[in-house]
């Protein structure tokens, strides 16, 4: 698999420029675009891999418009959630695929803004009109901003670091799990111990998606069918939470060594129990050199409460001005 020429050239032009500090956190002013650490190595190898995931160049370089829907099911296969949504997302720094290149605008550069998005929930009726707006910053020391508009209150409310640990509209995923992982990597709030625990091949859902994949009906157990699998080289990276107040005690990521895209995520609670997992596939389009969210349904599972959510989405380039 490969990335489009603008992304590949941006990565090559900036190779070796991105630096980490003495604790392994990114010196944000040294990253200018592309994959920051195309050849992870050294004592902070695990953090380099996670930064490659955080600064991922998939999904139209994170400039996207998404139309999707989530379905939730109880342990008895009874549907208890149907939530359609839209997302408008813009990368504000390190842009190399969709103009303007580099910084989105002067404001983003002055404020060191990395990414922003608006997520609108269209149903069910009791939450219709709710919207989340987020701004993520490059500096590990500047906390990301998350706002919620609640139509029942007709007010915008700022979300705290505790609020971002809440489930998203009844789904088996929290706001810090957006796009698989969107938690702030910080030495001052919910810091982690980072380690590579394995490097090996795994049998994984293939990126080659042809539309024949589906999930069976509840009476058939909601099984994935027609998934294609292939052997992939994988980094297994463990993030152990050093703050007992965070919802997850540890996260384990299975990250493709070639694309630096996550293939599966395991989240454990503070008691060491497997809590939530994220699995699914993305689609690779050879004509564009792009890996796009929106292949076979994405599956989120809560292994403590025995609940499952799967989502399907259409993702389009977000050429926002």
Image (tube, rainbow, N blue to C red):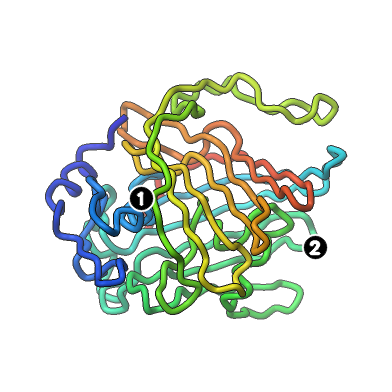
Q: Position of residue 15 (x, y in %)?
A: 15, 51
**Residue that mark 2 sits on:** 126
- Left or right of 95 on screen, residue 163: right
* Earlier-in-chain disc, 2 versus 1: 1
Q: Compared with residue 282, is residue 227 higher up or lower down, i.e. above or below? A: above
Q: Residue 264 location in percent, x, y?
A: 52, 41
Name which residue lies at 19% across and 48% down: 11
State which quarter of the image contains the N terminus. top left
> Residue at left 26%, top 59%?
94
Q: Is residue 231 above or below residue 146?
A: above
Question: For the point 33% across and 26% down, which residue is it?
Answer: 286
**Percent position of residue 79, x then y:** 83, 42
Pointer 2 local density, CA inside 10 Å: few below 14, some 14–19, many at least 20: few
Q: Quadrant of the C terminus?
A: bottom left
In front here: 295 or 205? 205
- The answer to whether 28 is drawn above or below residue 32 in the figure is below
Q: Label 1: which residue?
A: 56
Q: Quadrant of residue 7?
A: top left
Secondary element type, mark 1: loop
Tell me the element at label 2: loop
Q: Viewed as shown, does residue 179 lie left or right of 286?
A: right
Front residue (pair 88, 190): 190
Question: Tags 2 and 1 in contact by the CB under 8 Å rule?
Answer: no
* Within-10-Å neighbours for mark 1: few <14, some 14–19, many 20+: many
Image disc number at residue 169: none
Residue sitting at x 68%, y 61%: 271
Dividing the picture into quarters, in which one does residue 24 lie? bottom left
């Amino acid at each position: 698999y490969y990335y489009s020429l603008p992304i590949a050239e941006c990565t090559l032009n900036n190779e070796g420029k991105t630096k980490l500090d003495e604790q392994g956190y990114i010196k944000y002013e040294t990253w200018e675009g592309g994959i920051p650490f195309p050849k992870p190595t050294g004592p902070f190898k695990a953090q380099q891999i996670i930064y490659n995931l955080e600064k991922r160049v998939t999904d139209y370089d994170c400039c996207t418009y998404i139309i999707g829907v989530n379905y939730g099911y109880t342990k008895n296969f009874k549907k208890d959630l149907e939530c359609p949504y839209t997302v408008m997302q813009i990368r504000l720094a390190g842009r190399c695929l969709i103009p303007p290149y580099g910084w989105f605008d002067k404001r983003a550069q002055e404020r060191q803004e990395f990414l922003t998005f608006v997520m609108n929930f269209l149903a069910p009726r009791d939450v219709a009109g709710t919207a989340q707006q987020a701004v993520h910053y490059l500096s590990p020391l500047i906390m990301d901003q998350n706002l919620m508009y609640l139509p029942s209150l007709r007010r915008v409310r700022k979300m705290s670091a505790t609020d971002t640990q809440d489930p998203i509209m009844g789904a088996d995923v929290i706001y810090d799990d957006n796009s698989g992982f969107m938690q702030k990597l910080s030495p001052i709030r919910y810091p982690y111990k980072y380690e590579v625990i394995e490097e090996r091949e795994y049998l994984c859902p293939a990126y080659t998606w042809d539309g024949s994949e589906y999930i069976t009906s509840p009476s058939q157990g909601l099984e994935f069918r027609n998934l294609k699998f292939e052997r992939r080289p994988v980094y297994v990276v463990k993030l152990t939470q050093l703050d007992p107040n965070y919802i997850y005690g540890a996260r384990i990521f299975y990250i493709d060594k070639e694309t630096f895209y996550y293939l599966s995520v395991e989240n454990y609670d503070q008691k060491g129990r497997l809590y939530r997992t994220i699995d699914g596939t993305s689609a690779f389009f050879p004509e564009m050199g792009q890996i796009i969210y929106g292949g076979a349904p994405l599956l989120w599972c809560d292994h403590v409460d025995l609940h499952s959510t799967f989502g399907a989405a259409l993702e389009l380039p977000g050429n926002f001005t």
